[in-house]
Amino acid sequence: MRHPRRVGVWAAGILTASLLAPAWAAEPPSGGRSLPPVVELGVGGAPASSPPSREVLADLLQQLETLQTELRNLRGQVEVQTNEIERLKARQRDLLADIDRRIGELERRGSAALSPEAASPTGASVPSATGSASSAQEQQDYDAAFNLMKQGHYDRAAKGFRDFIAKHPQSALRDNARYWLGEAYYVVRDFRQALTEFSRLMNDHPKSLKAPDALLKIGYSHYELGEWAKARENLNQVIARYPGQPAAKSAEQRLAKMKKQEH
């Protein structure tokens, strides 16, 4: 029979050895070579995949949030560009309708100018200026600039109308040329220069058939420049000076729009 004290020492040694066993397994043998890692086998003998760490999951989540943010930004840009395209299309339709209406006015004005009864209060036949060589050249130069305008070559059209005004300072089409020069600047959003040309028309040709539309476009230009007080002033002048005309109706519509926009 063993002595109780010796049995206690022997048990303590066994317990100590069992606790230190993992540390011995982790240390390399005296030869300096480490033991191969223990690989857990999954189903079918394949190595079992370890679950991703928290750092990997956090990185993937951050990447997903970044992609979602970029997608939202791209969608916003597409919506803005779509709205801008629609606005430009509407602007182009309005311009074409305006051009068609003014072409009709020019045709009616030309027919009236060719009529001897319209030219003379007594109905007597008078020489028509359009029959002269200089008037034929004027019409040719004017039509060339106007055709560029209809084709959308606004810079070239503006140059054509400027050249026409300089070349034919006494032409009956001078006020028309000045108006379309202002329109050429307006459509490319050079509103300051458009204001200059429309204002010159109002000063030099206050009784021109183009005066109502020129005053209307002065109000429009101030509107586009954010000069709300000047825009209201000129639009109200259109209504007061030319009641019942299409320009007055357009002025009323723009004033209503400004009121809705709280300008």
Image: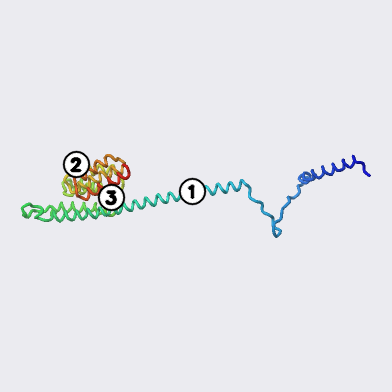
Q: Nearer the viewer, residue 246 or 145?
A: 246
Q: CA distance from mark 1 to mark 3?
A: 42 Å
Element class at badge 1: helix
Question: In this rendering, would 56 be left or right of 230?
Answer: right
Between marks 2 and 3 in the image, the one whose residue lies nearer the viewer: 2
Q: CA distance from mark 2 to mark 1?
A: 54 Å
Q: Residue 53: x percent and y percent?
A: 63, 48
* Mark 1 nearby-residue class (10 Å; few <14, some 14–19, many ≥20): few
Of the two numbered discs 2 and 3 on the same chain, state the one appearing first in sequence.
Answer: 3
Residue with the mark numbered 1: 70
Q: Quadrant of residue 111?
A: bottom left
* Residue drawn at x 28%, y 46% as measured from the top left: 256
Which residue is outermost to the bottom?
44
Q: Amino acid at mark 1?
A: Glu
Q: Cβ–Cβ below 8 Å for labels 2 and 1?
A: no
Q: Amino acid at mark 3?
A: Arg
| Image quarter (top left, top right, bottom left or bottom right) of the C terminus | top left
Q: Residue 191: x percent and y percent?
A: 29, 44
Of the two numbered discs 1 and 3 on the same chain, state the one appearing first in sequence.
Answer: 1
Q: Amino acid at mark 2?
A: Asn
Q: Nearer the viewer, residue 159 or 72?
A: 72
Residue with the mark numbered 3: 156
Element class at badge 2: helix
Between marks 2 and 1 in the image, the one whose residue lies nearer the viewer: 1
Residue with the mark numbered 2: 203
Q: Residue 100: x percent and y percent?
A: 24, 55
* Residue drawn at x 94%, y 44% as measured from the top left: 1
Q: Quadrant of residue 166?
A: top left
Q: Nearer the viewer, residue 173 or 55?
A: 55
* Residue drawn at x 8%, y 53% as measured from the top left: 126
Question: In this rendering, would 44 be left or right of 7?
Answer: left
Element class at badge 3: helix
